[in-house]
Amino acid sequence: MDLKQKLDILADAAKYDVSCSSSGSTRSNRGGVGNAAVSGICHSWSDDGRCVSLLKILFTNYCIYDCVYCINRASNDVQRATFTPEEVAKLTISFYRRNYIEGLFLSSAIIKNPDYTMEKLLQTVHLLRNVHNFNGYIHLKAIPGADPRLIYRTGLLVDRMSVNIELPSSEGLKKLAPQKDKQSILKPMGFIRTHIQGNQEERKMFRQAPTFVPAGQSTQLIVGATPEPDFQVLRLTESLYNNFSLKRVYYSAYVPVNTSSLLPVVAQPPLLREHRLYQADWLLRFYGFSANELLNERHPNFDLDFDPKEDWALRNLYHFPVEINKADYEMLLRVPGLGIKSALKIISARRETALDFDDLKKIGVILKRAIYFITCKGKYYGGLVFNEEFMRQRLGQSNRQLKWQQLPLFD
C-alpha cells in the first residue's frame, strides 16, 4: 500500500476525534522547521466542525479492542493501514513546508498492545523533534495501559497530550467498551498531571530544564451513546478539571457509525446538546459557576431552547433583576447576555457616572437578553411583568429568530 492510500484511510479514521486543540504552547523555533508560538498557530474548520489546521491522522486503525461505538473496532470489516514513524515524519514535514499545516495531531488505535503502540508514537515524535528539527505544535494521544516511562519520554517531546475518557460513566464503559476500564484511563491522566506540575516547579529553579507537555492535557468523551444526563456529564467535567488540571474537556456528539442492539437509535447526532455542554463548560471555567448550580437531580438536562446561563437565570429569578450600578463583578457575570468584557466595561464606566440603558449601548453592551435581568438607576425595561413564563416566551422567540449557519470551506 502506498503512502497516499495510507493517508486517505488514516486521515478519514481520525475525523471522529474532536479534541484537536492547537493552543497553549510557546515552543519557539530553535534553528529547525516550524514554530508553535501563539502567532504560529492558525485554525480552520470544515463544514462538520473538524479542525484542519493540523495534520490530523491515526498512526494505525488496526485495533485489538472491540468498542461497540467505534468505527475502528476489531470486528468491523474496514480497510486497515499503519504508518511507519518515518512516514508520519515525512508527511508532517512535507505538509508544513507547503504551508498546509502548522502542526500535528497524532492519535492511534491499539495495535498488538499498549506498550508497542506507545513506543511507535514515541519513535515518531523523536524523529520529528531530534532528526528533522521540527519545532511546530504536536498534540499526541497517550495510550492507556502503556508503560509510564514511555509516556514520560513522549511528554518531553510534545506540546499537548490527551487521554480519552471515552464515556461519562463506568457503567457505560462496561457496556460498550468492556476491554477498557475507568482506572486504566485515569491512571495516565494522573501521571501526566503530576509530571506537568513537577516540571513547572523545576523550570522555576532551572530555566533550561526541558519542558514536559507545556500546553497541558485534555480529554474527550462521547455524548449520547449512553443514557447519562447532562448533570452527570457536567459533574464529571468539573471533577476532571479540579483533580487533573485539564486544559479542556471535549464533547463529541454520538455518531451512529455501527449498528448494535447496545447502541441508541438516533436520527442525527445530538449536536445541539453537545453545543450546550460546551457553553456550560465555559461557564465552569471562566464564569465561576459549579455543576450543582447549573443542573441538579430535579433538572438533570439543559433546556435546548436556552443557553445554560439563561436556563439557570430563569430557574433562579430571585437573584434578579440586578442593578447595573451596584452589582459586583461576579454577579454581573451571571447576567444572561453579559460576558467578561462587558462586565469589565461596566465596572470601569460606572466609576465615572451612574449608567443607564443608553450608556450601556454606547459602551457596546448587547441588551437583547440582558435587558430582562437588569435595572439601571432603579428602572426596569424588560417588559410589563417580571415572571418566568413571560421571560421564557420572550427569550424563546428571540432565540428562535437566530439562524446559525456554518461558514462553508469551499464555494
Image (cartoon, rainbow, N blue to C red):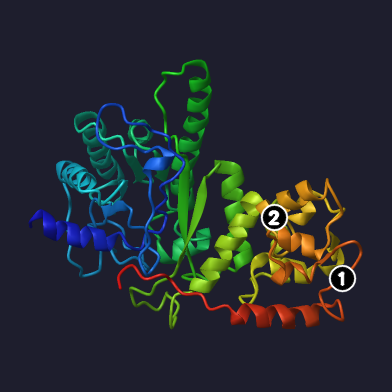
Asked whether residue 297 is in view, the answer is no
Q: Quadrant of the C terminus?
A: bottom left
Asked whether residue 223 is in view, the answer is yes
Find numbered disc 2 in the image and state the secondary structure of the residue it sits on. Answer: helix
Q: Amino acid at mark 2?
A: Ser
Q: Amino acid at mark 1?
A: Tyr
Residue drawn at 48 percent across, 32 percent down: 196
| Residue 316 coordinates in the image, percent (x, y) | 80, 67
Vertical placement of residue 409 versus 219, above or below = below
Vertical placement of residue 265 versus 184, above or below = below
Residue 56 sits in quarter? bottom left
| Residue 103 coordinates in the image, percent (x, y) | 31, 45
Residue drawn at 83 percent across, 62 percent down: 356
| Residue 33 coordinates in the image, percent (x, y) | 25, 35
Left or right: 264, with 348 as reference point? left
* Residue occupied by mark 1: 380
The mark nearer the N terminus, 2 or 1, is: 2
Left or right: 241, with 270 as reference point? right
* Residue occupied by mark 2: 342
Left or right: 211, with 128 as reference point? right
Q: Quadrant of the N terminus?
A: bottom left
Residue drawn at 82 percent across, 50 percent down: 350
Give neighbour class at mark 1: few <14, some 14-19, many 20+ (Cα, 10 Å).
some
Residue positioned most to the left: 1
